[in-house]
Amino acid sequence: MQWPTPTSAHKGTIWAKRLLWPLRFKFVRRLIYLTIILIVLYNMFMSTVNDLFGGGSGDGGTGTGGAPPDATPITSTNPQQAITGAYNYLRSDQPERACRLFDETGQAAFSAAHGSPNDCATAARNIRTQITAPGPYANPKYGENAVEVVEPEAAVYGCRMRVDGGPLLGSFKLTRAPDGGWLISGYELEAEKCRR
């Protein structure tokens, strides 16, 4: 008796059977199910953490207490960190803490641009009411050439950023402080470079 020679389609099924052979064991299937469940739970957990706490870099976060807006300004190690910190503070329960990232001139420009002349805290609270997704809002994405540094100043252009979950802020001017950190020293809703 001569065995039939397998056709090319038949060869494909033999290969598939060999590949799937371990799945006939209940133990292997249970390990696969457990792995999938753990991956899904991990992703759900990380998504929740990012939504609650922002999950990003920056100076800020939510918390209790907090200093008044007229307290000593907070300097950041680089311009991008300062702006990410502002977004992070603005989405928190105490958005007025973002004002600590500005010097007096920057606070005045920011508050005037947002309809609260000479009251940065009110401007920050007004912006907070427009935020729909605090987690994503705390993590703005910086596009190409969004940050320009020409010592001792820097600019961060809002038109070159992407922000999810709330309003895109304008453009920021930053100045290096005596301690080497960066303070927001100017603000415009639309910088001239963004109008071109």
Image (spheres, rainbow, N blue to C red):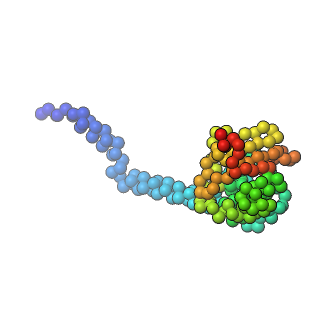
Write the residue at 80% across / 64% down: 68
Q: Residue at x 67, y 62 (%)?
A: 128
Residue at figure coordinates x 69%, y 41% from the top left: 193
Residue 124 located left or right of residue 3: right
> As displayed, is residue 11 above or below residue 91?
above
Q: Residue 172: where, in percent of width, then height?
A: 73, 48
Q: Give coordinates of residue 150: x percent, y percent.
A: 78, 37
Direction right: furthest residue: 178
Closer to the camera in the image, 6 or 143: 143
Q: Is residue 101 visible?
A: no
Task: Point out the image quarter for the C terminus.
Answer: top right
**Of the pair 94 and 119, the residue shown nearer to us:** 119
Is residue 70 in view from this perspective? yes
Q: Quadrant of residue 45?
A: bottom right
Instruction: Tell which of 195 and 85 is nearer to you.
Output: 195
Above or below for 126 versus 29: below
**Residue 41 image offset from top left, x and y in percent:** 51, 58
Q: How many marks?
A: 0
Q: Is residue 154 left or right of residue 18?
A: right
In the image, farthest residue toward the left: 1
Answer left or right for 19 relative to 178.
Answer: left
State which quarter of the image contains the N terminus: top left
Give the image location of residue 149, x and y in percent.
Answer: 75, 39
Q: Quadrant of residue 132?
A: bottom right
